[in-house]
Amino acid sequence: MKTLSFLFMMAAWGSTFGLTQINISPSGSDTAGDGSKSRPYKTLAKARDAVAKAQAGDFEIVVAPGEYEFSQGVEFFGAPFKGKSVSIVGQSSDGKKPRFVGGVKIPSSELKKVTDKSVLAKVPSERDGVLYSIDLKKHGLTNYGKMHQRGFGSPSRPTPMEAFLDGNPLTLAQYPNDGTRMEIGRVLDPGFRRSIAAGQGAYKPKPDKNIRGATFECDNPRLGRWASAPDAYISGFPSAGWAYDEIKIKKIDPSSKTITLETPHCYGVYSNNTKGLDMKDPASWVAGMDVCVRGFKVTNLIEELDADGEYYIDRDNGIFYVVLKNRPAGDVPFYFSVIDSPFVSLKDVDNFKIKNLDMSAARNYAINARNCSGLSIEDCDIHSGGRGIQITGTSQSKRNKISRCKIYDLAYSGVSISGGDRKTLEPSESSVEDCEFFDNARIIPCSNPALSISGVGVAVRNCEFRRHPHITLSHSGNELVIERNIFENCCMGSSDMGVVYTGRNQTTQGNVIRHNFFTDILAPHPDAIVCGVYVDDGSAGQLIEKNIFCRVGNMGRAPAFGAIYVHGGGDNIGKRNVFIDCQSGMSQEEWTDEKYGSALKRESAKFYKEVDANGELYKKRYPKLQLQLTADYPRVNYVEDCRVWNTSLTMSGKIHLKRNRMLTPNKGVTKLDIAKVDSWTLDDVKRCFGDDPTVKEAMKGGFGVRRK
């Protein structure tokens, strides 16, 4: 009987060359459908169930054009999918991919102009548009998600409900609207400090059992407007320039001009006014750092609902409010994110493919995979939600590939991929190729990289990264390759950070950063410190070669920031790079032997538990590692065969210089021609310096997405 049922299903679904197709469509039915093209299922979950019940083979879930609203994610876990290769493939129509929507769609025709006087009394009288509302309860929406502290040092959580107009994210009501931040005045109580923001060797704060938020002064006449806001938050940099945080306001006292926070920031809160610091208090040393980006805005309060595209959700009454200068046509949709699980979750499955889909308006990852091999994610657009793709695992996570995808407008991070085995140095053979990343980390702009890679043998090739505010590509592991990518206008919203970043682990060796183009990596303030490639806190053995850096980095008040910056470590090699209009090419901030030795002790578990740095494998593969794990290791870095234009090759550190030269402009190109370049492009580099052999070598093979 089971055999006859299976044969019947196969006949209904259709099979071509051994591939069984199961169809889903927005107009299909999970009860009356059978998965055939003429009678498709309605949901991915139903198609998943059909594959799980079938015998081993190759299956393709064909996703017809249209939109699919998800109330919960779909899991492909383990045993039911062993011996099967599964594909989820979208069919385009008029150039549009099928869209997975992680929430509810409501047409703009449901907008009602607000006339309630009690509401109008709360919002600013001067608004850049008309105030509208939608009753979310009427459309079955009751789960609005919870606002919570999120940022540096906080647990990773899904976003609360967000609102999108025709797929584009709207802005939660805030002040100021122009991207600036209010200054933190006198700090009456910095709050509980979990640690002190001074990097490796940081002093521990004084013992304090009183877990509390900070209280500080804010001299702004709008405080009175915010005093009764029930769920308002500060959002910004309360301390260091890498530690963005979003914290609920507990109390506002307009008479004393003070704000008290409900929970602490991990480093405590520091004032923008650094005069009269008590330098006997180690925590005060940090107060003078990154003042140029310190400050905050207030968010999530109807009292500041005044700019075009701003919204507020009254969670008590289930009402959505929005200010719009131009009312959209009635069929233009709003989307409200609901699901906090991924659209597709994979675990312990092999040979799985996801292709040609649009995924948006989810509150968590779009795709999450663990311990998978042979996973392929192709030609997908993932946007306007929480996070993008996460692929995790060690030796089981192999030969996974993300290609030709667009990752953009996400609240937090874009893609995270790991694989391989660091103990055995078995490579994952995984890669991210020909993908575009732009405008991500739009809610929490720190510690949310566009792309993170880790493990062994992961490659990033021919990708393009644009307009990312903080770490753009984070890497940690061995034999990682970052090549032929473009980084443009990145790391521009913070301080003490780099576009491509690694740190705090001398055993992460054998990594290569080559043939990349960095342009317009500039600081948000003259005192802010940013760089293109950051090798942080004692890390060693990175090869950075044949890259082109144009207007990259800012030293600010630091001794050694530039296009490439090494913090404490050695044996990092900058070779055959090109530096154009950079303050500094490659520099190092030196550590004392005492500081370096203390760091080695703190991080020892990484060297002798996560991997065996004393084992024969690591000794053979990385012969200098044993020296690098000693306190008196000399920590010299190398700059060789590089070319510079209007750039100081190095500003600080133990830097061994060899065969570096000034660039010579192409014939017929004058210094005035070069000075007129406002923003360096690859065409500009080729036009001005393309005849130089080092430039030619760096540009060989091209940069960025290989478009068909």
Image (tube, helix red, strand yellow):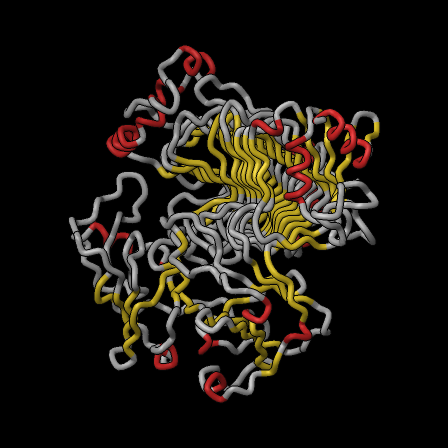
Q: Which quadrant is home to the C terminus?
A: top right
Q: Quadrant of residue 570?
A: top left
Q: In which quarter of the image is residue 561?
A: top left
The residue positioned 75% from the left and 38% from the top of the image is: 22
Give above or below for 678 relative to 616.
below
Q: In this view, does 167 lie to the left or right of 579?
A: right
The location of residue 339, given as percent across then percent down, is 54, 53
Q: Can residue 405 be seen in this view?
A: yes
Give above or below for 582 relative to 106.
above
Q: Is residue 354 left or right of residue 17?
A: left
Q: Can residue 668 be seen in this view?
A: no
The location of residue 179, given as percent across then percent down, is 50, 67
Camera-side residue: 358 or 517?
358
The residue positioned 27% from the left and 62% from the top of the image is: 274
The residue positioned 45% from the left and 36% from the top of the image is: 502
Camera-side residue: 272 or 227?
227
The location of residue 535, given as percent across then percent down, is 44, 36
The location of residue 110, given as percent across then percent down, is 65, 75
